[in-house]
Amino acid sequence: MKKGSWMLLFAGLLVTLSLAACGSGAPQVDWELEISGDVETPMTFSYQDLAEMEQVDLTDILMEKSTGEDEVRSWSGPALEGMLAQAGAGDFTTITALAADGYAIEVAAGELENAIIALKDSGEWIADVSPDKGPVRLVTPDTPANRWVFQITEIQVNQ
Amino acid sequence: MKKRFQLLALLMALLITACQPAWEFSLFGLGEERLVNRQVWESYADFGDGDKVPLEQILYGLGARIIAEITITDPDGKQFSFVWEEVCAEAWIEKGGSLLISGLEIVPDQVEISLSPWEEEVEIEITDLAPAASASLGIAPPELAAGQSREVPPADAVLLLFLDGFGYLRYQESLAAGLIPELAKLDPPLVGLTTYPPVTTVSTASLLLGTEPMIHGVETRGIRKTDQETLFDVAAAADLEISAVEGEALAFILRGAELTLSGDKDGNGGTDDNVLGNALSVLQEGMPDLFYIHFHGIDDQGHEVGPGAPAEIEKIREVDAAVGQILEQLPPGTLVIIFADHGMHRVEGDGRLGNHGHLISRDMLIPVWIITID
């Protein structure tokens, strides 16, 4: 084997090892989610930050769609409640969720119970299986799916 | 070897094409006789499920706007007539050329469309509103705009007041029932026509771009954004101040506007009171050059309880009162365009009591008021 081939093999091994060290097996994605508004410490979470946080599984959740057939799917990702607490959000009335394409929705605090920032859809990384609906998506399991903002980039907390 | 493979592929493609049955039928009632065939079907195939396409999609593309009846004659001369509003949701054209109407499969030889007399009454289209607003503000219309700007006076500012789901026929009924004292103070609205499908995302795109869905490309419910130039883009390029007060969510992405969302903060089950509060707050700060206010409640209640139900009537009263409050706060020299995006008809089942989305007068006709504040 030539010297160059050995170096290529070594580099590949290094990449594999470093990915394995991450533990989550998450794809490498360039994405950030900002938490802003009425919080003590505005925060920015990278995709890797989100992947390394404790993952909550929401199993067999009814996805009530405004168009097309409803679906039952499972979602995984960090709990929104923990992220808001980390940013120091106290009592608030609503959040405004903003997506990369400019879509925005204001969701009442009461509708956010058990909400997660989903990274996986039915066990698969959203970034891999449906990049146009990811890589991250707000999932609020107790509400219709029009609140489940995909490609979410910012959560503004409103008192 | 490569050439041999290409020849084989060409032969197979020809064989597949030849195996597809050719079909064709004549369509009457939309001006001159039209032929509908497999080629026409294929050009609308993206709107279907692979096997069938909504018949309305093709009829709209061929020029139908409000359909009253359809009569189908099969090759044996047998005729089948349908009132369109009774079958519009279940009318398909299959890949093989048969029509599937409310579960009945008919091989058509001729199809006769009877248009609603309402088509003759239409005075303005939703695609005219962006050109009208542009003309009044002294800016160019959006690039794709094909609507007429009409004769609107120059104005210091323009308000687009959007009453979601308040169709023209529901307006007439509300007027007769005394539900809308504020709107009744205004001159009667123009009879307006929206675009197909009459749903909020598509209609909003038609409003902001001033052209038909087949041109602007927002042709179905699921699309929430356009890359084409909108009224807001033109106004922003002219350094005009643009504000938008929406309900809890953007129905369509309003690029270029200073946006205020109006979630149901008070938890009373509706957002129109929040929209009104936010709109009045904006006006207290000073009327923007271009202001867009979107009330969703009539549409929400229309879906949930159906047009004419007490909760929907109450919502019409509430929105009418809100319109009155907003008009009171506007400075002189403001051009106000009050309009709906579509109407609503009663349905049963599907978890809803009202819906819209068809080429029928209840869905397609909209009221349009164009007034100047003195």
Image: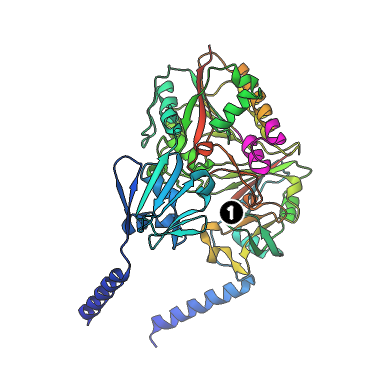
Magenta span: predominant SS is helix
Above or below, comparing residue A46 to residue B119 in the picture: below
Residue drawn at 63 percent across, 35 percent down: B298
Q: Name the residue at the bottom extreme.
A: A1
The residue under label 1 is A150
Asked if residue A79 is among those painted magenta in the image, a careful observer would answer no
Above or below, comparing residue B360 to residue B11 in the picture: above
Residue drawn at 62 percent across, 23 percent down: B176
Picture coordinates of residue B243 (x, y %)? Answer: 55, 30
Q: Name the residue at the front extreme.
A: B77
Foreground of the two, A148 or B299: B299
The residue segment tinted magenta is B295-314
The answer to whether residue B62 is seen in the rendering is yes
Q: Is residue B180 left or right of residue B190?
A: right
Foreground of the two, A140 or B30: B30
Mark 1 belongs to which amino acid? Phe
**Label 1: few (<14), some (14–19) or many (≥20) C-alpha neighbours in 10 Å:** many
Q: Secondary structure at mark 1?
A: loop
Residue drawn at 66 percent across, 25 percent down: B179
Q: Is residue A106 left or right of residue B52?
A: right
Asked if residue B310 is among those painted magenta in the image, a careful observer would answer yes
| Count of all numbered marks drawn on residues in the image | 1
Picture coordinates of residue B164 (x, y %)? Answer: 58, 35
Above or below, comparing residue A87 to residue B307 in the picture: below
Quadrant holding the N terminus of chain A: bottom left
Quadrant holding the C terminus of chain A: top right
Q: Is residue B61 left or right of residue A109?
A: left
